[in-house]
Amino acid sequence: MRLRHWQEECSTQAFKAFKTGQKHFMALATPAAGKTIMAATLAKYLFSENMIDYVVCFAPSVAVQKSIESTFAKILGRPMHGKLGAAGGVFTYQFLTTSKSADWSFLQSSRVFAVFDEIHHCGGHDTELSNSWGREILTNISDNVNYILAMTGTPWRTDQAPISLARYIKPDFAIQLDYVYGLTEAIQDNVCRLPEITLIDNDNLSVNQKNYSSLCMAMTEADLQYSRILNDTEALRYTLSIAVKKLADVRQEHPEAGGLVVASSVDAAIRIQALLISEFGQSSVLVSYKETNPQEIIDNFRTSNTQWIVSVAMVSEGTDIPRLRVCAHLSTVRTELFYRQVLGRILRLMANIKNQQAYLITFAEPALTEFTKRLKEDVPQMIVKFDKFERKSASETPSAGTKSETKGDAKADSTISETNWHFTKTEQNEKSPPASWVPFQLIGQYRQQVFSIF
């Protein structure tokens, strides 16, 4: 397999670091750059030099776990099912905390290389202040393996906790990375698609009988919650019309291209799918945490000609569907980490496609606008530093589970945990209107702000 330049450079650099006595190596590579191939190549180097007996990998979801297992097995030429004759095994972070039968004693008697994918899911530097996944890594894994590769495309946490296994430089506590491969470089190297981002706005919003000339003004100056915009049928219809047109244009030269809609709840996803089918004549599938076979739905969509997949927290980081070219981001979750990971779903390149541009459409909500403007920053300085992290008591912790970076309803609406991107119970949020409901109407003209940053 021919490596991309960055994959060869990073794996070689990590290999040399391990040979000279370094145990931990942390790499930032933008989503969709091909981190798994780089990690498997590094494992192959270590096996060839007789530096390890096994490799164990950890992933944030079952979908990513299967992808890692397949890629490592292909590059190493040996299975990764964790049984006799295997080069090692691949496990989810959830397995670390829930398995009653896991026996990690072999780590102490063998030479082991541990790979942690999307390590930002694991928070905390010590067992007392870590989240459950971070605690298990610190307790059972990190001290008992010979070499560690930690990988991430977004090296920060929304709750502002330090990332497990990461090093921070005093006095500012900025994260120290051994290797950085950002989105700008990936686009220049033709490793990732060039993203074009369209932010939808309206020039006249009436909130509580007062008019505002933009969504940003209405949200910052009035008590308008973002969920009201997402639930407005006309606003939704307009945004979907832009996304459908983009996909139609793309399919002129890439007939199998697909689109992704990231929805905030199952109820919202059902409404969106109904609009796509009945009003826009689009083919679509819906995947959510309520499905009995979500991975099968995703796998079938990956190789089908269906135009849209409407997802509720299922098509997230590490999910590899290269034919996705258009994304409508219609989730109430508004953190920079989530935003960049969603964008990464449409950036994977495909061979023999002339125009490799990707398109993300969302609303000109204040936080999303800021995230868009600083996409060129691989590590946004304003959010990756922390002074001191302390575990809050249950009474101090927001019920939604994540700390919002925006005002208003983000805490109430956000149902995705930073440590595990599977949904928690959302039925109450879906059925009940917010307590701070105010009269609201979109009465102006829609407008689009298009960002071609790179």
Image (cartoon, rainbow, N blue to C red):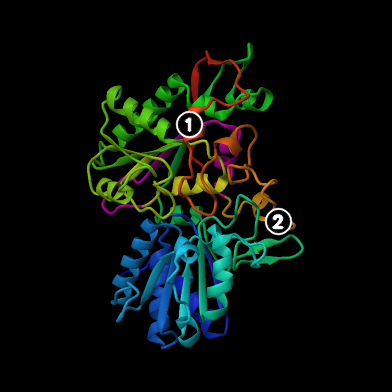
At x 34% / y 29%, what residue is drawn? Answer: 245
Question: Which residue is identified by label 2?
Answer: 386
Question: Which residue is identified by label 1?
Answer: 430
Question: Can you say whether 59 is above or below 429 in the image?
Answer: below
Range covered by the magenta-colored residues: 349-376
- Inspect this view and state whether residue 104 appears: yes
Residue 208 at x, y percent in the picture: 63, 14
At x 62% / y 23%, what residue is drawn? Answer: 218
Q: Nearer the viewer, mark 1 or mark 2?
A: 1
Using the numbered discs, state the Cα–Cα distance from disc 1 to disc 2 in whole angstroms: 34 Å
Residue 431 at x, y percent in the picture: 48, 28
Toward which corner of the image does residue 262 lie, by quadrant? Answer: top left
Looking at the rendered structure, the kind of residue marked 2 is: Phe
Q: Residues within 10 Å of mark 1 (few under 14, many from 20)?
A: some
Toward which corner of the image does residue 122 lie, by quadrant? Answer: bottom right
Looking at the rendered structure, the kind of residue marked 1 is: Glu
Residue 375, magenta (yes or no): yes
The foreground one among 298 and 429 is 429
